[in-house]
Amino acid sequence: MGWRRNWSEVIPFFAFPEAVRRIIYTTNAIESLNAKLRKAVRARGHFPNDDAALKLLFLVLRQIAKTGKCHRVSGPKQKPISPLSSKKGSPKDSG
């Protein structure tokens, strides 16, 4: 494992007080989010206007907010759920 090989680099981190470690964790989370946004923009390449770029960033942030994780926005499309499939008395339930 990488952290075991670099244990001498990991140990000094634990010397910081807990409050400082929380700030470092927060900074890492912000950097991770920023990396996801940059990756999405880079994958797209160029945008016809500013609104298109903002829409992409919105979709990336929305996906992260839904899952609580940093996943790619682009990926396999999910099959749409029929509004009738969850209602009682629908044609699917009567068959």
Image (cartoon, rainbow, N blue to C red):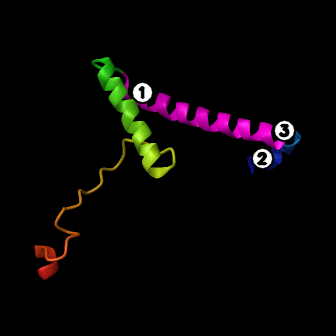
**Real-space CA distance between mark 3 and mark 2, rounded to the nearest whole angstrom:** 8 Å
Residue at 29% x, 17% y: name it. Answer: 49
Q: Earlier in the sequence, mark 1 or mark 3?
A: 3
Residue at 20% x, 69% y: name it. Answer: 85
Examine the image and state in which quarter residue 87 appears.
bottom left
Residue at 78% x, 40% y: name it. Answer: 19
Residue 62 inside the magenta-drawn segment: no
Q: Is residue 15 above or below residue 80?
A: above
Mark number, residue 9:
3
- Identify residue type, mark 2: Trp
List the residue tagged with mark 2: 3
Residue 34 inside the magenta-drawn segment: yes
At which x and y percent is residue 79? Answer: 25, 57
Q: Is residue 75 above or below residue 32?
A: below
Q: Is residue 91 above or below residue 24?
A: below
Residue lying furthest bottom: 95
At which x and y percent is residue 33? Answer: 54, 35
| Secondary structure under the numbered disc 3 in the rendered image | helix
Q: Residues within 10 Å of mark 1 (few under 14, many from 20)?
A: some
At which x and y percent is residue 31? Answer: 60, 32
Q: Earlier in the sequence, mark 1 or mark 2?
A: 2
Is 90 positioned to the left or the right of 76 in the image?
left
- Identify residue type, mark 1: Val
> Which residues, given as a range, are shown in magenta?
16-45
